Image (cartoon, rainbow, N blue to C red):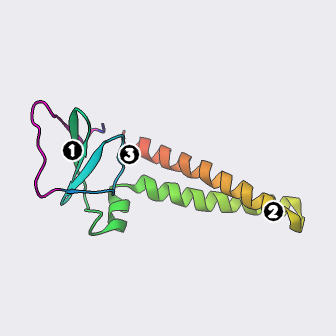
């Protein structure tokens, strides 16, 4: 649970907005289901609901939602692309062998996965401070 979420135990108030739509958009964070009602994001667990308000509804403006509500995703992707490309390029230059292209691509891919995860994780932790 983040600082901006409200926890509603199911035994106190078993509710669900009739107009809320089940959605795949958003991080489930272990929830059974998740719903959206405008900017309201509701995660349903066995014993509770976790509810928070997004600044932008991702169904209406996915890019705006990423920028204002989930910048960690954008930073993770940018870190993966830029870092992976740079490392693949450096490996290719060091090897100086046309056959090293596969090695540089594999190394770049693995580096992009690791760097993307680090960028995402660091940004998410900073965002939650």
**Residue in front for this viewpoint, 48 or 126:** 48
Q: Position of residue 89 (x, y in %)?
A: 75, 63
Q: Is residue 8 a member of the stretch shown in magenta?
A: yes
Q: Position of residue 86 (x, y in %)?
A: 69, 61
Q: Position of residue 14 (x, y in %)?
A: 11, 38
In percent of the image, x 79 and y 62: which residue is there?
102
Using the image, tell me which numbered label, if any, was put on residue 51: 1
Q: Which residue is mark 2?
A: 92
Q: Which residues are magenta?
A: 3-20
In percent of the image, x 61 and y 61: which residue is there?
82
In percent of the image, x 81 and y 65: which residue is there?
101
What SS does tag 1 mark? Answer: strand
Kindly report which numbered mark, 3 or 2, lies closer to the viewer in this rendering: 2
Q: Which residue is mark 3?
A: 127
Q: Is residue 124 a member of the stretch shown in magenta?
A: no
**Residue in front for this viewpoint, 123 or 31:** 31
Is 95 placed left or right of 36 in the picture?
right
What SS does tag 3 mark? Answer: helix
Marked residue nearer the N-terminal end (1 or 3): 1
Question: Crowding at label 1, few (<14), some or many (≥20) Cα neighbours within 10 Å?
Answer: many
What SS does tag 2 mark? Answer: helix
Residue found at the far right of this picture: 97
**Residue in front for this viewpoint, 129 or 109:** 109
């Amino acid at each position: 649970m983040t600082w901006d979420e409200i926890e509603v135990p199911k035994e106190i108030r078993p509710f669900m907005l009739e107009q809320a739509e089940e959605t795949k958009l958003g991080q489930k964070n272990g929830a059974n289901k998740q719903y959206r009602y405008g900017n309201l994001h509701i995660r349903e667990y066995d014993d509770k609901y976790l509810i928070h308000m997004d600044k932008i509804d991702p169904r209406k403006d996915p890019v705006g939602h990423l920028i204002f509500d989930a910048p960690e995703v954008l930073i993770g992707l940018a870190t993966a692309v830029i870092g992976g490309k740079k490392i693949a390029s450096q490996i290719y230059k060091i090897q100086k062998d046309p056959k090293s292209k596969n090695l540089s691509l594999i190394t770049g891919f693995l580096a992009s996965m690791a760097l993307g995860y680090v960028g995402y994780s660091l940004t998410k932790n900073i965002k939650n401070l």
